[in-house]
Image (tube, rainbow, N blue to C red):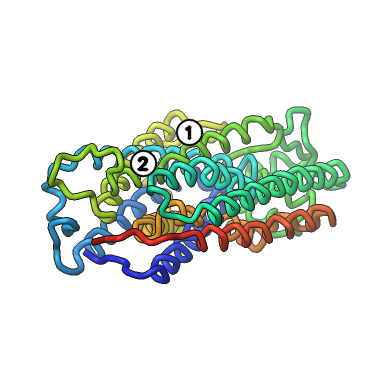
Amino acid sequence: MYVIEDKGGAIALMLASLIFLGTWPAVLTLLERRGRLPQHTYLDYSITNLLAAVLIALTFGQLGESKPSMPNFFTQLSQDNWPSVLFAMAGGVVLSIGNLSTQYAWAYVGLSVTEVISSSMVVVIGTTLNYFLDNRINRAEILFPGVGCFLVAVILGSAVHASNAADNEEKLNGSTNIYKLGENGSVDSSKEKDAAKDLENGASAAKYVDKAEAGTAEYLIELEERRSIKVFGSSTFIGLGIVFFSGVCFSLFSPAFNLATNDQWHTLKEGVPHLVVYTAFFYFSISCFVIGIGLNILFLYRPMAGVPKSSFKAYLNDWEGRQWALLAGFLCGFGNGFQFMGGQAAGYAAADAVQALPLVSTFWGILLFGEYRKSSRKTYILLGFMLFMFIVAVAVLMASSGHRSTK
């Protein structure tokens, strides 16, 4: 089994994890904005997410000599370690539900703000739990000021969202475009029939969104016509409720994985070695896969959030954007795997520094989706301070990392 022996290697894994985990949400958001049904996207994503765990287990989990205290992947599959396996699978369940929830939250609340709120909850709840589970392996005098920096960034992120929402409302109220908002927030257009006809063959949405300049009212309205999850007229509390629910789920999966690999509660029989990170991640990903596939097959026929019904046959025939959904699964799978590998060496509280992933998501949100384009000066100032605090937070949390002995 491959073991990380130095702090530098652990930090490198956490940085790679940060990039991967901050990028895959942007890929799924892109597909939703292009009109692909979220059920189809998540089914594709779930396949490669599991495949990433299998590849990690068969490579890193089998490298090197198998030791009694740290057996290789195949050796450990036959051992009596079911209490730890159940902790790992519980972590996979809550992560899968959290990821599924955020897929809808990105549409209602926006990519950047969703990631900021959910990540802050991971830092406040999950990182605090991991600190005590890890027998205080991380330096508290550095770790908790880092948590404080994260909370400041969260407050600034909330202010960015409020300011940007006010900017968008002002744009829509002052729009002279033929598209107007109806009383219930739906799109009302004098060209509604023509647009609907074009949407059936997939040409209208791309044409309209490409024509409008990012950041304008026309862009916002035309995007609403194309996307698969309609958000105009929805209650603010619906989106925020989804975000907070996903944040609670995300806060619990890392401590559950920590318990699976380190057995702080002494649930294993005497002489049974702890689950190595690669085996735990394999079981973790299996439960993540089962929940993701099961729920989204259900959502094909009983969709949420006003998304159109579909069928398994329609999913199999939907190749539009499938390669991007598969890529997102790989990014998330390897991102989670690298986070856990870094956490095993440096402590899971420090590995939770990857929850600064809104830095990366915000970058993609601005670059790909034109978030905050043509916003007010106030919004830009708040955005700049938010990103600065995230940079400080991730640096401080990584500086707090200790090193777990593997001897």
Describe the element under mark 1 as helix, strand or loop: loop
> Which amino acid lies under the numbered mark 1 shown in the image of this protein?
Lys
Horizontally, residue 212 falls left or right of residue 68, namely right
Q: Position of residue 253 (x, y in %)?
A: 41, 42
Query: Dividing the image into 4 quarters, which one contains the C terminus?
Result: bottom left
Write down the quadrant of residue 269 in the picture: top left
Query: In whole angstroms, how far apart are the C-alphas of marks 2 and 1?
Result: 35 Å
Residue at left 56%, top 54%?
A: 30
Quarter residue 56 falls in? bottom left
Residue 95 in the image: x percent, y percent?
42, 42
Residue sitting at x 38%, y 48%: 135
239 to the left or right of 139: right
Q: Which residue is mark 1?
A: 309
Q: Secondary structure at mark 2?
A: helix
Q: Residue at x 85, y 44 (%)?
A: 170
Looking at the picture, does residue 155 appear above or below residue 21? Answer: above
Marks 2 and 1: which is nearer the front? 2
Between residue 70 and residue 355, name the one nearer to us: 70
Q: Quadrant of the N terminus?
A: bottom left
How many dots with numbers? 2
Relative placement, left or right, of 197 versus 51 is: right
Residue type at mark 2? Answer: Ala
194 relative to 338, above or below: above
Image coordinates for residue 254, horizontal then vertical, percent: 41, 46
Q: Residues within 10 Å of mark 2 (few under 14, many from 20)?
A: many
User: How far across and how far down the image is residue 11, in percent?
Assistant: 44, 66
Nearer to me, 18 or 23: 18
Residue that numbered label 2 is attached to: 256
Residue 93 against residue 271 in the figure, above or below = above
Q: Is residue 50 above or below residue 18?
A: above
